[in-house]
Amino acid sequence: MAKISRTRGATYEREVAAKIHDVLGVKLKRNLQQYQEKGLGDLILGRFIIECKRRRKIAVYEFIEQAEAACKPGEVPVVIMRADGKESLALMYLDELLPLLGNELPQQSQVDASPPEAS
């Protein structure tokens, strides 16, 4: 991976972690082990493993814009999609998702949102 792509990805991971902190009050650390081992998420929030992807263009914006156009005030656009031979995916705006994730967190004041220790 080119250095500029890694830098852009790391910047986006920090941006997402900051957004989660602002909304949920949970401080996440980037999972730096992801650079040494495959199959690890960028951020971990309880049982949610978060992959942060930033690309120049992503076609799914057309899908969510179509769903959004069908919404009345107060309704939430969600896209369910599937490629041939793949599992279905759900797509929604991050600002709509974060309160749902927050409802899944334990009611403790401190949540362990750090990546697991390396073995």
Image (tube, rainbow, N blue to C red):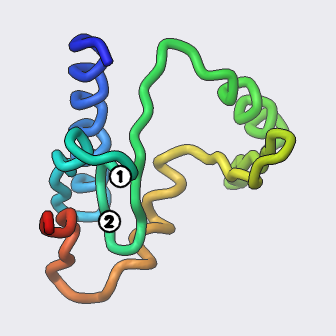
Identify the amino acid type marked 1: Gly
Q: In this view, does 20 lie to the left or right of 104?
A: left
Q: Which quarter of the rendering shows the C terminus?
A: bottom left
Which of the 4 image quadrants contains residue 10? top left
* 37 or 21, nearer to the observer: 37
Q: Which quarter of the rendering shows the N terminus?
A: top left
Residue under the image location 77 percent in, 48 percent down: 86
* Crowd tier of the residue under label 2, counting other residues whose Cα lies within 10 Å: few below 14, some 14–19, many 20 or above: many
**Mark 2, residue position:** 45
The nearer-to-camera label among 1 and 2 is 1
Q: Residues under labels 1 and 2: Cα distance? A: 10 Å
Q: In this view, does 8 lie to the left or right of 80?
A: left
Q: Where is residue 100 in the image (x, y as percent from the top left)?
A: 50, 68
* 60 or 108, nearer to the observer: 60
Q: Where is residue 89 in the image (x, y as percent from the top left)?
A: 70, 51
Relative vertical location of residue 98 with respect to residue 7 in this rendering, above or below: below
**Mark 1, residue position:** 41
Q: Is residue 42 left or right of residue 112?
A: right
Residue under the image location 21 percent in, 51 percent down: 31
Q: Position of residue 92 (x, y in %)?
A: 62, 47
Identify the amino acid type marked 2: Leu
Please tell me the numbered disc located at residue 71.
none
Residue under the image location 75 percent in, 46 percent down: 79
